[in-house]
Amino acid sequence: MSEETKSLNFIEHIIEEDLANGLAKDKLRFRFPPEPNGYLHIGHTKAIGISFGLGLKYNAPVNLRFDDTNPAKEEQEYVDAIKKDIAWLGYQWENELYSSDYFQQLYDWAVQLIKDGKAYVDSQSSEAMAEQKGTPTQPGVDGPYRNRTVEENLDLFTRMKNGEFEEGEHILRAKIDMQHTNMLMRDPIMYRVIKKHHHRTGNDWCIYPMYDWTHGESDYIEQISHSLCSLEFKPHRELYDWFKEQVYDYSKAEYPMLPKQREFARLNLSYTIMSKRKLLKLVEDKVVSGWDDPRMPTISGLRRRGYTPASLRKFVDTVGVAKRENVIDVALLEFCVREDLNKTAPRVMAVLNPLKVVITNYPDGKEEWLDAENNPEDESAGSRKVPFSKEIYIEQTDFKEEASSKFFRLKLGGEVRLKNAYIIKAENVIKDANGNITEVHCTYDTDTSKKVKGTLHWVSIKHAVKAEVREYDRLFMDEAPDSHDGKDFMAFLNPNSLKVIEAFVEPSLAEAKIGEQFQFQRLGYFNVDDDSKPEALVFNKTVGLRDSWAKQAPKQNNAPQPQQNKPQQQRKAINVVQQLGKKYTNYPPEKQEKVKAEILELAKDVSYDELEPLFNTAVKKVGTRIAAMLVLQVKLSEGQERNEAINSFIEKALDDKSELLVAEAKEIA
């Protein structure tokens, strides 16, 4: 296998295989299909990066198609915001399209399905239909309207389209199989009545197609070669294929290529929620100032906070394309923006919590303009002039009246270097009536060749410009705020996620423009907020120079320890189970029995929450699925209640080609 082949992700492998099997390269076509019912968030950047990245790799067109099939939730505001976000990320779509472009074609195909006896109008309540649908372990039953005549179905569907019925009176369903093992195949809804204004088609339609009916057929009309979506749509693939195969019979001359749906793991981020509904609640409850609040995980919020397109693309590239769900540490996202801004952001000086310093031996009224390097990472960035005078501000935390020898900032009797300026020595302090230090009196030394350990940033009081600084922190204090049963995600809000400070910045920032980014030396990366005005500067803190949250996490000693003093850290039982399962089917029967006994013993130390993700293991990884089944046997014997995920896992195993897996599934079927 070549190095190039090894570096391909699994989607690229699929595409390469299709090309090798005869698919012409000029037939490759991809799409990104957002629903315009909210703003794009960090999770969408992965889907965007995959589709548009493939377009760039294969020089293939990528459509931007808005799935606008629910007029109750969609707005033009969201359409405009989505287009802005994708363009800002640096991607260009081939065609701007809408599912509503295909409403007439979808309707015509639906009529044809009715004529062929493959769709019917149902007139029951949603409760009755849900009851008839069954459960994952119990088949559904046919409803009373399933065998309506073609003529009656055509009449009712036409009248639905003409607006003769109210919402909820009738729906159109595909006629597939109410006993199908995949519940999505049990006569899914294709159309419902919605009497609301559509942002593009106005009041032309009062019936709207469901996502599963619209999605694949839109792909088919656009002749998309590879329809890429997140893992939650994997169970929908069977229905996707059924629908496209039906319409292919009607339109294969016009649309000769059938699209292929494939799924990837979506992007989940720690300390973050991705649900549009929950993000909307934050906006509606005024927890945040809007969709573009810099604490929001929306692309517009990240942009306003100071994240760069390059940092988000790097983040997505680093995360990669996977088949299994996992949670990415938000620290990786912060690392990516630090790395990018370190190369590009000019260095400036700002003081957020000022303490006045008076340099007693500096002449009154004198001022100097000193050279300051703009960016040591970029020689072409040049330099600027910063003013120096008798009175300056430093950070309050950079001075202690008394301090240990390990404190390398300013202390009484101690010396520090002022960045781009002189060395100063603290001689005495001035305090207020409460004993708080209000001034530090220092002397300065023009001999800057002396070696001192500390270097401080500062601003000249005479020249300093006032600015509002908004220090943002993570919006949630919990790593997975929406994963706690019985507890509202709002309970984990960080009450200190925003701190507004009156700061002082060097005068070169007086003309800073909205969106410009800077490193406030020794403090972090900041950008100019949308609210900023020349006479009232506003800066947002993008990210600190270091991960401040890492300091708060429980400390782990990563230094190597002598073996006699500390035993080696044991691997988690679930990880050992997975490792044993990988080669299970390759072992001879005697070895399988030994491994099986080991897995059954390890199962006692595996929690159900650790086990359940293994239920989604790829079909071809039979050994891992057998290992998961063995652990499940133990969990059930310990009293674990059966649920939909367990029942589905067992049912799929019973239908597997592997006799070993089927045998273990039968033990608990």
Image (spheres, rainbow, N blue to C red):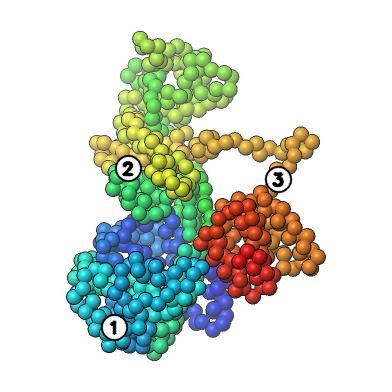
Residue type beneath disc 1 = Asn
Name the N-terminal-most of marks 1 and 2.
Answer: 1
Q: Position of residue 413 (x, y in %)?
A: 52, 14
Viewport quadrant of the C terminus: bottom right
Residue type beneath disc 2 = Val
Within-10-Å neighbours for mark 2: few <14, some 14–19, many 20+: some
Q: Which residue is at the far right?
A: 590
Q: Which residue is at the far top?
A: 433
Left or right, 430 with reference to 203: right
Residue 570 is tagged as 3
Within-10-Å neighbours for mark 1: few <14, some 14–19, many 20+: many
Residue 227 seen by the camera: no
Do the residues under discs 1 and 3 have CB atoms within 8 angstroms? no
Q: Which residue is mark 1?
A: 153
Residue type beneath disc 3 = Gln
Q: Residue at x 69, y 48 (%)?
A: 571
Foreground residue among 57 and 599? 599
Do the residues under discs 2 and 3 have CB atoms within 8 angstroms? no
Q: Which residue is at the far bottom?
A: 253
Name the N-terminal-most of marks 1 and 3.
Answer: 1
Q: Position of residue 535 (x, y in %)?
A: 24, 36
Circle 2 SS class: loop
Left or right, 89 with reference to 634: left
Left or right, 284 with reference to 551: left
Q: Position of residue 283 (x, y in %)?
A: 31, 48
Residue 270 seen by the camera: yes
Q: Which residue is mark 2?
A: 287
Foreground residue among 246 and 395? 246
Q: Position of residue 517 (x, y in %)?
A: 39, 44
- The residues bearing labels 1 and 2 have C-alpha atoms spaced at a distance of 49 Å
